[in-house]
Amino acid sequence: MQRQFTLEYWIDDGWYVGKLKEVPGIFSQGESLDELEENIKDAYTLMMQEEHSVTRSETRTKYIMVNVA
């Protein structure tokens, strides 16, 4: 299965740096835009594998309130 995400990127000190807008915490970098794309895909895959490795019986949820300006 494939999903489409938005890669937001910029150039910082000669490196392509980017993040997935729809998935907070997924950042990466590369020497080229192609390398950044591959690295960000790898970062997403690793994050998803780690998330699925948590035993679901250990997972709990709680509703919280957050002030929004």
Image: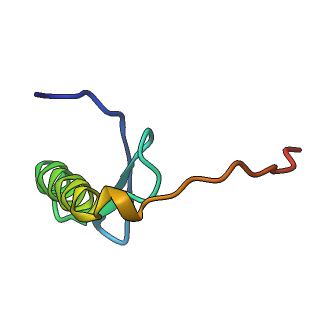
Q: Is residue 16 visible?
A: no
**Residue placed farthest to the front in the image?**
57
With respect to residue 28, does 62 lie above or below? above
With respect to residue 44, does 15 lie above or below? below
- Would residue 62 appear left or right of 9 to someone viewing this image? right
The number of callouts visible is 0
Q: Quadrant of residue 50?
A: bottom left
| Colouring used for the render | rainbow
Q: Is residue 60 visible?
A: yes
Q: Residue at x 22, y 60 (%)?
A: 43
What is the x, y in percent for residue 28? 29, 63
| In front of the other: 60 or 7 | 60
**Residue placed farthest to the bottom in the image?**
13
What is the x, y in percent for residue 58? 40, 65
| In front of the other: 58 or 52 | 58
What is the x, y in percent for residue 3? 22, 28
With respect to residue 21, does 57 lie above or below? below
Which image quarter holds the C terminus?
top right
Q: Residue at x 81, y 51 (%)?
A: 66
- Would residue 59 appear left or right of 2 to someone viewing this image? right
Which image quarter holds the N terminus?
top left
| In front of the other: 67 or 28 | 67
What is the x, y in percent for residue 56? 33, 56
Q: Residue at x 43, y 59 (%)?
A: 59
